[in-house]
Image (cartoon, rainbow, N blue to C red):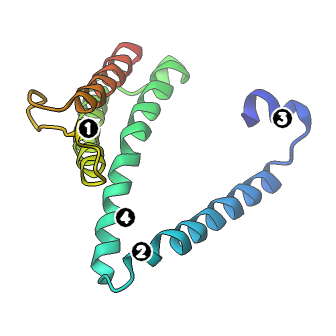
Amino acid sequence: LYESYGREAGWDLPKLFWRLLTAFCAWGVIIILLFTSPFEGQEPFFFLVVGAAMSGVMMWPYTALVLVMNTTRLPEHLQPGWGRVLGMWWATGFYGYFSVLLIGTSLTNFGLAAFETAPSILGSGAGGYALWAMYLTAQAYTVSKS
């Protein structure tokens, strides 16, 4: 956004950085305040596990975006080689697969049985099939663009 619009509009990059950093920190505080009260009495390890699971879910789009951006926007001599591209394809598939399982299990635990996901894909609920379809579409897009 900064490169395509902000530089020409006269945005100050250090101010933008500090505002975004402040907003992200405030968002983290809000999340902690709003979502820890239902879990009072839980061991600290519980929050570590939840944070790790959320980080894995965030790594899925991150690896896909890094791969697509690096193979489409960088000059050819700076683009990653095929070994790294294959590694990023694998990482995107890995994080995406387990993210779909985690999201489907979480939605099922919240009472939405239609989102049940099976590790073998077959045997999932209707919503689970929709999650798997989104995963496969995102993976196919990532592979085709890189």
For the residues labelled 2 and 4, the Cα–Cα distance comes to 16 Å
- Badge 1: how crowded within 10 Å, few (<14), some, or many (20+)? many
Which one is earlier in the sequence, the residue at label 2 or at label 4? Answer: 2
Of the two numbered discs 3 and 1 in the rendering, the one whose residue sits closer to the viewer: 1
Which one is earlier in the sequence, the residue at label 3 or at label 1? Answer: 3
Of the two numbered discs 2 and 4 in the rendering, the one whose residue sits closer to the viewer: 2
Residue at 36% over, 40% down: 60
- Percent across and percent down for residue 139 are 31, 24
Instruction: From the image, tell me which residue sits under label 2.
Output: 38
Report the amino acid beneath label 3: Arg
Report the amino acid beneath label 1: Phe
Of the two numbered discs 2 and 3 in the rendering, the one whose residue sits closer to the viewer: 2
- Badge 3: how crowded within 10 Å, few (<14), some, or many (20+)? few
Residue at 45% over, 25% down: 68
Q: Secondary structure at mark 1?
A: helix
Residue at 54% over, 66% down: 31
Report the amino acid beneath label 4: Gly
Instruction: From the image, tell me which residue sits under label 4.
Output: 51
Examine the rendered structure and indicate whether residue 91 appears above or below residue 52: above
Which one is earlier in the sequence, the residue at label 1 or at label 2? Answer: 2
Of the two numbered discs 4 and 1 in the rendering, the one whose residue sits closer to the viewer: 1
Which one is earlier in the sequence, the residue at label 4 or at label 1? Answer: 4
Q: Quadrant of residue 33?
A: bottom right
Instruction: From the image, tell me which residue sits under label 1.
Output: 115
Examine the rendered structure and indicate whether residue 1 appears above or below residue 29: above
Instruction: From the image, tell me which residue sits under label 3.
Output: 7
Q: Are marks 3 and 1 in contact (CB under 8 Å)?
A: no
Q: Are marks 4 and 1 in contact (CB under 8 Å)?
A: no
Q: Secondary structure at mark 4?
A: helix
For the residues labelled 1 and 2, the Cα–Cα distance comes to 23 Å
